[in-house]
Image (cartoon, rainbow, N blue to C red):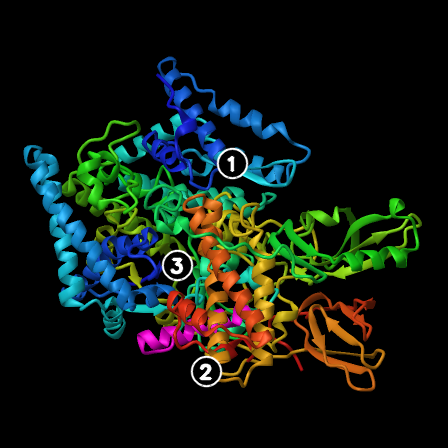
Amino acid sequence: MTEPDFKTMTKEKLLELAARKKVPASARLLKKDLVALLKKALKAEGAAAGGKTRTARTAKKKAAGKPSKTAKPTRVKKGEKKSVKKTASSPAKKSTAAIKTSAGRKTTGKPAKKAGAAAAKATARKKAGPKTSSKRRAKAAPRRAKARTGKESPPVGHDLHPPFELEDMAQEAKFLVGAPTLLDESRHEATPELPEAYGEDRLVMLPRDPHWAHIYWELNPAAIEGGFRDLAAGRESARAILRVHSNDGEGPRAFDVDIDFRTRRHNLHLQRPGATVHAEIGLLGPGGRFVPLVLSNTVTMPVDGPSDLVDEEWMTTDEEFNKFYQLSAGPDATARQRRGGQSGGSFGVGSFSTPRAAKNSGEVSPWMRAEVILYGATTPGGRVTLGDEPIEVRSDGTFSIRLALPEGRHAMPITFHSPSGRVVNRIIPEISRKNRRVTGEVSS
Amino acid sequence: MTQGYLALVLHAHLPYVRHPEYPEFLEEDWLFEAITETYLPLISVFDGLRKDEVPFELTLTLSPTLLSMLADPMLQGRYRRFLDRAIELSCKEVERTRTEPAFHELAQVYHWRLTQARELFVNRYQNDLIRAFASFQDSGHLEIVTCGATHGYLPLMNVNPSAIRAQIQVAARTHQRFLGRKPRGIWLPECGYLPGIENYLEEVGIRFFFTDTHGILHASPRPKHGIFAPIYCPNGVAAFGRDVESSKQVWSAREGYPGDPDYRDYYRDIGFDLDYDYIRPYIASTGERKRTGFKYYRITGPGDHKEPYRPADALHKAALHAGHFMFNREKQIEHLAGLMQPAPIVVAPYDAELFGHWWFEGPEWLNFLIRKIAYDQDNIRLTTPLSYLKRFPTNQVARPAESSWGYQGYHEYWLGEKNEWIYPHLHKAAERMEALARRHRSTTGLPERALNQAARELLSAQASDWAFIMTSGTMVEYAVKRTKTHLSRFNRLYHDIEGGRIDETWLAEIEDRSNLFPHINFRVYAE
């Protein structure tokens, strides 16, 4: 079969070809990945007469190609492995896999392992008629659930998100009218450019998923100069550092990442989902002295598994929870016990509202709440912040703040800024609250 | 006996695209195609169900940008022009295909559909599709919920909480203005949830929202019934989780319904297939080929060979698939009902535009499904989140986990290497907007107009659609242009307002171009 000239084809044309060839390619793929996918598919088609396909082996080889630097290698591999086992019930799950490159970025779209076989099975299932297959599935579900109960749980993130390629493609189809470029007269209108910088010192952290945060910054040359002066060390001996402070309920940790001030962005890998994290950029002197230049906002990383907290009114056993977890997330997912630590997701500076019970039961259930008061003093005229939020400082420099204290372990970073705005000190009280629950009849 | 409930949720949204500065604009076709292929067919399905007195309840998002476009007289006029051209083409196609019976029949089908669309749009609903949707709300069949004002991706706005608040406040006010009542629920843009967002929802009286599956499963404390019962956030706003199984059943690449060989092929379109001179008047005004909506082939199978589309076969398949879907929900609910009290709820949300636009037979599938559920079984009933909460008001209290329905379940689709560059600018603009609003709270006259326009430009730049398109790789140039244009206008307004030198002519020009939310009050950023 003659191969089309992929180079001259637009991405849309490639997608069109992919759809015609039934290659599960999403428009989210980069063009080169799409081409690779199509080439493979065409090759497989060509070799089909001999009944051979190298797709599976190639995909495996590629996945194994960069093991040490991949971001979520275990999860990806497990997902793939599981998919193979699940061919009968969910061939769609193995049609793409996420691979992290050494730069921590993701490229998608490894072709399905044994895609041909999966398609054949899918067709066979359709031929068998809808009712037959669904009956089989309905019967099979509880059996599979039972078989897995009590086993060590696999990671769940990928299981909850099987790649629904059709959905992806269809969602993108909303925006497809012609070629992926401006076809109208507006292409003659210049696109305005945005400022390179806003002339400020700023460091912002954005959680991207449970293990990755995107960080961007802007630093004025004057701030960097001031840092060097404060450090009182030679420029050559100082290192530009991103110092990351993380607290996952097992105590604070900090680690440094070497950066180049000029890149102005960085993708940061974090070990602990649910941790409260903030960072600062500064200069590290040869003697280990660190001069901070700018402080980031504080974020709570998303969790990637079920919470360790169990509601007092609805006591939920692991077995019972796993039963519903499997039904909710698919038969292969089991509630994974996270490696210790509380869920950090339920406490954030933006959510200090006082919890109250749901207001619809008609009768008042007994309840209790807890609050905590933090108070202190700073130089009059100075500023104090809790996370990113300023705390009101009285004219004599004293301050106090009263906060709801939900269950769990919480870090409350208090930062002191001098009247000129410099960070002069930081205290991070860690407070934990755990209700001991008594079930059954309680004697007074 | 009813053992459990199915909540079908359709999320209808398109970004605000309106270019009065050009006589025609290709990206406006997004709306026109959606009206012809999705919104009008859905309205017809609902209308038929109501006429036949079929009991049904559905949830539908009408995003504030979509509402604003549907209500815009200029876009309504351009849609009529779009329809007229399509009808003209359909007449030519009926002629052209006279010697090809298979295509001739299809050309007649398209001609009928298009003239029917015109009849509905122009005569029956008098250009007002919002009123059409609202009538189903009034008759108790639809729960229409809102979305972010411009579909801004809320979890990545948390650097400036006032920006999240404004997205919700403006959405709620716009919803009320167009639909006559406050929204009681919301589809969070891209299902993007961040703990604490519920506080902004509570402020506007919203009582429920949706998260992806893991948003509920990973809630804290653990939800006893997984996604099969709602949870209450600590402030009493309810969260419902998306059911994986029912989503997969429709959309997975190999098992999903829309890939069936009998269904219409989305890609083959006469805009690309026919002689250039013949099709020239119906493609882009600049001469580039584009889709026309006339598609004559069915998916057929893998490979280039395509057979003509046969509507009757496709309709039969849609009925079979509806039966299959219902049977699986019945079994799912039967199984769940034995395990839990109260009765389980299965939440199945879909992008509304997938029905009809992508999956041509989607609206008919929905029609069959609703009728079958009403008459062919007793186990399950359709419901909306509020109806369910009314029946089962006591639920577990837990806070959902940060999540989205995007790739991998978190934020990377909107925060990847192709679109991360937008955030320093978006955050800076949001910070400046808040500062402006606080400083100029009591201003009136020209500065007030400039401040309101600044809010419009910021909201427009925040639409998650732009970041989505940048990653997906389709129409990227337009998405980049929109982001930069709105941010540049915002920045100029900021400097003009701060410098006390507002150019009224330019302001009037951009007010005309970005006329979204005419009643916006910039003070929403200072409240």
Which disc number belongs to residue A362? 2
Secondary structure category for the residue under label 1: helix
Q: Which residues are magenta?
A: B162-183
Residue found 23% across the figure and 30% down from its top = B306
Q: Decide if residue B260 is on the left or right side of residue B389.
A: left
Distance CA(mark 2)–CA(mark 1): 47 Å
Q: Decide if residue A265 is on the left or right side of residue A258.
A: left
**Residue located beneath label 1 in the image:** A82
Q: Quadrant of the N terminus of chain A?
A: top left
- The amino acid sitting under disc 1 is Lys
Q: Position of residue B279 (x, y in %)?
A: 20, 40
Main SS category, magenta section: helix
Say if the magenta span includes residue A114. Answer: no
Q: Position of residue A383 (x, y in %)?
A: 77, 75
User: In this picture, is A21 found above or below B455?
Assistant: above
- The amino acid sitting under disc 3 is Pro
Residue A183 vs residue B410, the one in the foreground:
A183
